[in-house]
Amino acid sequence: MKLASRFDAPLSTREAELYDTAMCELVGKVDPVVRGQLSERLARVPSGPVRSVLLLAHDPDSHVAAPVLRHSPLLPEPVLVAIAWTRGQGHLAAIAGRRHITPRVSDMVLARGAAPVLRTLAANDTARLSEDGMARLARLARGDGRIKDALARRPDVPGEVRRGLGIEAVESADPEGPLAPAAIEAASDWLTALRAAREPRESDLARCLREDETARIVALVAYLGRDELGQTAAAFRAGALDAMVLCLRMADIRWPLAERVLRRCLDPGAPVAAQQAAYQGVSPRAAERALRALRMRSSLRVVKGWPG
């Protein structure tokens, strides 16, 4: 685990290669329990241990492979397609639950997955489905109530498919997902309790990333940047890249950790890596001024567009 923790801090290309090589050797020598722990540890690392993650993703034990298959940004589409084609139902279940998988990947999952896997895929409303994939799930839904219920909750199901299945669009009870007002309020309460015990710090952000606590991440960013929580939450909820980058810089978060936060909260296609030079070239104080100006411009646009 000490080797894996090296990737929590910035590394040169040479250092990353050396630690990656060492972990590859470790993966080949340890038992499945340790490999599973290593997979959990590396699942959300945004860059560096590419070879180690690939080895873990191909592990024949699905309990080892699942964390990186479900979460790692280091696995490209061709690798996911190949694993979906060659591995078993445990691997397929992890891929089916992965956020933002492409139609090529979801088609392969549909081609090989058993009923539990297909239910997971149907319930994953971030998974992109091809036209044929949607049609296949619709056919399966006629004999599987859980798939039918999942399709009813998906926003991408065409009207003709809904009519054919006799389902109506279901309005989400949690329209902003992990950043809904109730989640932000709970995160604020958590932060208050943490402050009563000790001062929040950057390492708390890394822990919340590992635990997939998005609302707590936003609360910490707001606190460390001395920003209003509602303003920070609004930027993250809207996926406003410029504002999110400035919030993180204002909080004086190191770039590797800031990059992980951005990749967690934005769609996979967002140009996160392109922000590094600007991020590292601006001070927290300058970021505060820029964020204030950005919000002022946004407010002016709203006022100018106000009817009356």
Image (cartoon, helix red, strand yellow):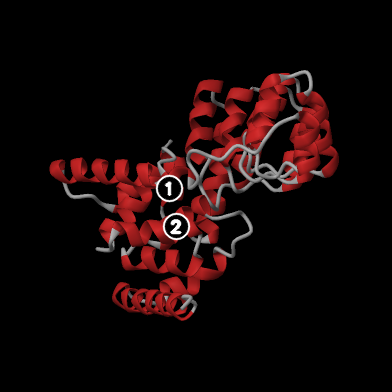
Q: Is residue 283 above or below residue 9?
A: below
State the image coordinates of residue 300 (x, y, percent, origin top left). 42, 80
Res. 263 in view: yes
Question: Are dots 2 and 1 in contact, CB under 8 Å?
Answer: yes
Q: Secondary structure at mark 1?
A: helix
Q: Residue furthest right?
A: 132
Q: Residues within 10 Å of mark 2 (few under 14, many from 20)?
A: many
- Which residue is tagged 1? 179
State the image coordinates of residue 77 (x, y, percent, origin top left). 73, 47
Q: Is residue 1 above or below residue 273?
A: above
Q: Residue at x 60, y 30 (%)?
A: 66
Q: Secondary structure at mark 2?
A: helix
Question: Looking at numbered disc 1 in the image, what kind of residue is underneath it?
Answer: Leu
Residue 122: mark: none
Question: Looking at numbered disc 2 in the image, what kind of residue is underneath it?
Answer: Phe
Question: 288 or 49, which lies in front?
Answer: 288
Q: Residue at x 31, y 52 (%)?
A: 220
Q: Residues within 10 Å of mark 1 (few under 14, many from 20)?
A: many
- Which residue is tagged 2? 236
Give the image quarter of residue 150.
top right
